[in-house]
Amino acid sequence: QVHIVESGGGLVQPGGFLRLSCTASGNIYRLNEMAWYRQTPGTQREMVAHITSGGDTTYEDNVKGRFTISRSDAENTLYLQMNNLKPEDTAVYYCCMNLSPLGQQDLYWGQGIQVTVSS
């Protein structure tokens, strides 16, 4: 069984920063690609950052230059460093990990964590 736990969210003023973490525990055999998504009420969940098993990254246009996704496979952890936060970054953030031992697709989601950017 696998457990995914997110941490690091909260309330921050515009221009501030937060670092989200997402840690997997349990029967972890392989870490494939991983990503961070976010969702606001009444909208679809959107991907904001993605990282491959090789460390290649892609970002949604609105967060490029402000957010950095990274991973520590030794710690089974995914990170999202968010700098220069804006009110429009307010959302529930979800991590998503592909943990297929065969390199296929077996997705696990975090519980979601609230990020609020407000003065």
Image: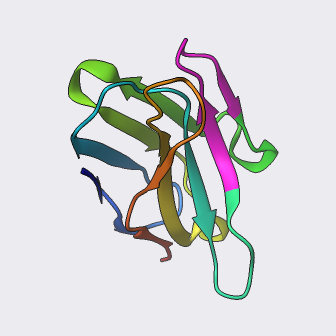
Q: Is residue 55 magenta?
A: yes
Quadrant in which residue 114 is drawn: bottom left
Is 83 within the magenta? Answer: no
- Number of on-image labels: 0
Q: Residue at x 59, y 23 (%)?
A: 52
Residue 48 is situated, as x and y percent measured from the top left of the image, at 66, 48
Residue depicted at x 62% and y 71%: 39
> Front-most of 119 and 91?
91
Q: Name, please, the residue furthest toward the top.
A: 54
Q: Which residues are magenta?
A: 47-58
Residue drawn at (24%, 19%) of the image? 74
What colouring style does the render use? rainbow
Question: Looking at the image, which residue sits at the far front?
Answer: 102
View extreme (right): residue:
61
Tell me if 104 is positioned left or right of 81 in this view.
right
Query: Is residue 86 visible in the rendered structure shown here?
Result: no
Q: Is residue 114 left or right of residue 76?
A: right
Q: Position of residue 53 (x, y in %)?
A: 52, 18
Relative to residue 54, is residue 38 depicted above or below?
A: below
* Res. 26 visible in picture: yes
Q: Residue at x 50, y 76 (%)?
A: 118
Q: Nearer the viewer, residue 60 or 82?
A: 60
Image coordinates for residue 87, horizontal then vertical, percent: 61, 70
Measured as percent of width and height from the top left, residue 86 is found at 61, 62
